[in-house]
Image (tube, grey):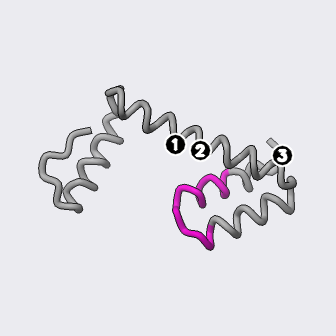
Amino acid sequence: MPRGDLLIAFADAALSGERETIAQARDRLEIALGAAAVVDAAAVISMFQLNDRVADAIGIPLEERTAEARTEIGAVLGVDNYSA
């Protein structure tokens, strides 16, 4: 994949939620591959987020490591009976 490193960096940045990190990754991707690649990459990232939310909503079981991570996050947030 041409410039897969930049695509991965953009996806990681998007998931970080850090505006400056996202902007820097987006700009590097646009310089290397063009605006259309940024739009396509953003669409793919969005679809993965959507699919994850749909899977949660309809009750598809989580992988064990994901369930454990959610339990840990729930404990940090003070949610005693968090179930995924």
Q: Main secondary structure of the magenta part?
A: helix
The reply to whether dot 1 and dot 2 touch (C-beta < 8 Å) is: yes
In which quadrant is the N terminus drawn? top right
Q: Which mark is residue 41?
A: none
Q: Which mark is residue 2?
A: 3
Q: Which mark is residue 46?
A: 2
Of all residues shown, which one is farthest toward the bottom?
20
Q: Is residue 13 left or right of residue 37?
A: left
Q: CA distance from mark 1 to mark 2?
A: 5 Å
The vertical placement of 52 against 45, above or below, is above
User: The disc labelled 1 sits on which kind of residue?
Assistant: Gln
User: The disc labelled 3 sits on which kind of residue?
Assistant: Pro
Q: Is residue 19 magenta?
A: yes
- For the point 29% across and 48% down, the residue is 70
In this rendering, which labeled residue sits more in front, label 3 or label 2?
2
Mark 1 lies on residue? 49
Disc 2 secondary structure class: helix
Please report whichever mark, 3 or 2, sits nearer to the chain's N-terminal start. 3
Q: Residues within 10 Å of mark 1 (few under 14, many from 20)?
A: few
Disc 3 secondary structure class: loop
Q: Residues within 10 Å of mark 2 (few under 14, many from 20)?
A: some
Please report whichever mark, 3 or 1, sits nearer to the chain's N-terminal start. 3
How far from the left and from the top, in percent, is residue 71?
Answer: 24, 48
- For the point 13% across and 46% down, the residue is 81
**First to last magenta residue range:** 8-21
